[in-house]
Image (spheres, helix red, strand yellow):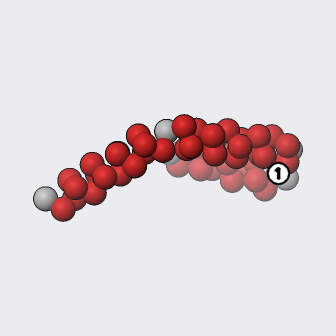
Amino acid sequence: MEREVQRVRRAFRSGRSRPLRFRLQQLEALRRMVQEREKDILAAIGADLCKEML
């Protein structure tokens, strides 16, 4: 994990970045996935919260 963090930090410091268009496409894909799986996500959260209460 530490190796990955260092890799990401080096990339950030280098100024290398993904284009805005790419980032917007990724956000749109994430939004669609959350909408499509909303019921599954809510069920998983509910199941997880119930486990913690026991």
Query: Is residue 16 in view from this perspective?
Result: no
Please name the residue shown 59% across and 50% down the image.
5
Q: Is residue 8 left or right of residue 53?
A: right
Q: What percent of the width, then of the height, locates residue 15?
A: 85, 52
Q: Which of the 4 quarters of the picture holds residue 30?
A: top right
Q: Pick the residue in front: 53 or 10.
A: 53
Q: Which residue is mark 1?
A: 14
Q: Vertically, is 34 above or below 46? A: above
For the point 35% across and 51% down, which residue is it?
Answer: 45
* Camera sees residue 39: yes
Q: Residue shown at 76%/40% (left/top)?
A: 25
The correct choice, above or below, for 53 with respect to 24 in the image is: below
Query: Dot 1 lies on which element?
Result: helix
Decide if residue 37 is on the left or right side of residue 54: right
Type of amino acid at the residue the image marks with label 1: Ser
Quadrant where the C terminus is found in the figure? bottom left
